[in-house]
Image (cartoon, rainbow, N blue to C red):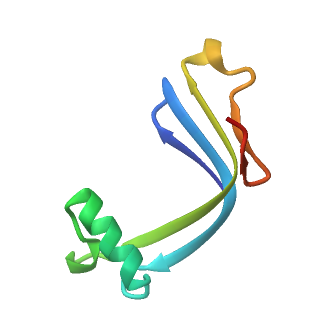
Amino acid sequence: MRLALPDTFDVVLLQGEAEYFPDREVPGDAAEAFADKFGWDPRVEEGPFLYARVAPRTVRAWRGEPELHGRVIMRDGMWLE
């Protein structure tokens, strides 16, 4: 799985293995941590929601296109910096 956050100028790109959990099946500790961090709990909403847990293998980060080269900060699950 690849996940790019948050926008096209200030980017964090994660590559790794992902697990998906419907809102009614997400592990309780993960759901509570999400609700605490964001002040919102999808489990109490009417519509269905899907949680994704990503175990990153590679992380790239940059601010704008000129910084694209050489911005790998995690490789094979190990932090480089």
- Depth check: 62 or 50 in front? 62
Q: Kindly give the residue lying farthest to the front in the view shown.
A: 81
Q: Position of residue 64 (x, y in %)?
A: 54, 18
Q: Position of residue 76 (x, y in %)?
A: 79, 52
Residue at left 25%, top 65%? 36
Q: Position of residue 75 (x, y in %)?
A: 77, 45
Residue at left 34%, top 69%? 33
Q: Is residue 72 above or below residue 44?
A: above
Q: Is residue 39 above or below residue 70?
A: below
Q: Quadrant of residue 40?
A: bottom left
Quadrant for the C terminus in the image: top right
Whether residue 75 sits left or right of residue 60 in the image: it is right
Q: Position of residue 49 (x, y in %)?
A: 37, 72
Q: Kindly give the residue lying farthest to the right in the view shown.
A: 76
| Number of numbered callouts drawn | 0
Quadrant for the N terminus in the image: bottom right
Q: Quadrant of residue 55?
A: bottom right
Q: Kindly give the residue lying farthest to the top in the view shown.
A: 66
Residue at left 54%, top 74%? 20
